[in-house]
Amino acid sequence: MHFQKHFLRIFFLTLVGVALLIGIASHFFSKYAEDKVRNVLASIPISVSTVSVNILTRSIELSSVDWTQPNDSLPQFPHHLFLNNLRVEGISVYQLLAKKKVRIHKIVFDIGEFQFNTGLKKPKSKAKKSSIELKDLTIDRLVLKDIYIKVFNDSLDQYEGVVSLSLENIVLADLDSIRELTSYQVKSFDALVTH
């Protein structure tokens, strides 16, 4: 009986110690990953107010995301994106590290505004090769919630409205063609557009 109590006490203390180590390690890995995400965003450049990475839930959350495409020809009417919240959930760390494949369960663009100027022509430039060679991208679900979208040509409005959209099973087999919309495969989608 005394042996069982002693064993249970050691087992419980070991379990608590392992949980504390996992908690502390995940905190430091999360902070490291947050710094990496901030560096990547600064290179794009995208402005965000907060970056939160949680290694245990395999998620990244950005708040107050603000991006404007630099443009020389018409600086008063650039492409522009603002989001209250951007969440990337269920990132497969194993697939990323072991197989160089990006697998994401869900990406949510939550309440924002996107302005797209069809009159802007960006000169073709050769994209830089990434230091990490990734093989493909799979997103189980991409959700846009209440995004005000405005499409215009210089200062003339062509379309504007609020879009809520859900895309299912998005696959991009060749990451070199990430900017080509025709390179993506989408299994299904559901949309609501209000004008």
Image: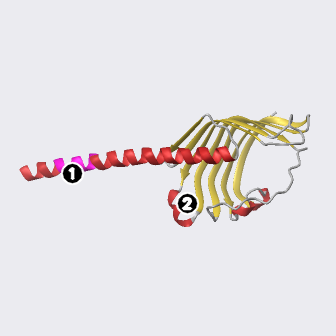
Q: Can the viewer see residue 56 in this picture?
A: no
Position of 94 with respect to 172 (left or right) is left
**Residue at 75% from the left image edge and 59% from the top image edge:** 127
Q: Residue 125 carries which label?
A: none
Label 1, secondary structure: give it. helix
Residue 44 in picture, x, y percent from top left: 70, 47
**Residue at 50% from the left image edge and 60% from the top image edge:** 94
Position of 148 with respect to 118 (left or right) is left
Bounds of the magenta span? Answer: 9-16
Residue 103 in picture, x, y percent from top left: 58, 57
Answer above or below: position of 28 versus 182. Answer: above
Q: Residue 96 carries which label?
A: 2
Label 2 and label 1: CA atoms lie apart by: 34 Å
First in sequence, mark 2 or 1: give its number.
1
Amino acid type for the residue under numbered disc 1:
Phe
Q: Quadrant of the C terminus?
A: top right
Label 2, secondary structure: give it. helix
Residue 113 in picture, x, y percent from top left: 74, 35
**Residue farthest to the left?**
2
Other-residue count near label 1 (Cα within 10 Å), few / some / many at <14 / 14–19 / ≥20:
few
Amino acid type for the residue under numbered disc 2:
Leu
Nearest to the eye among marks 2 and 1: give it. 2
Q: Main secondary structure of the magenta part?
A: helix
Other-residue count near label 2 (Cα within 10 Å), few / some / many at <14 / 14–19 / ≥20:
some
Q: Can the viewer see residue 101 in this picture?
A: yes
Position of 157 with respect to 133 (left or right) is right
Q: Which residue in the structure is indicated by mark 1?
A: 11
Residue 131 in picture, x, y percent from top left: 63, 61
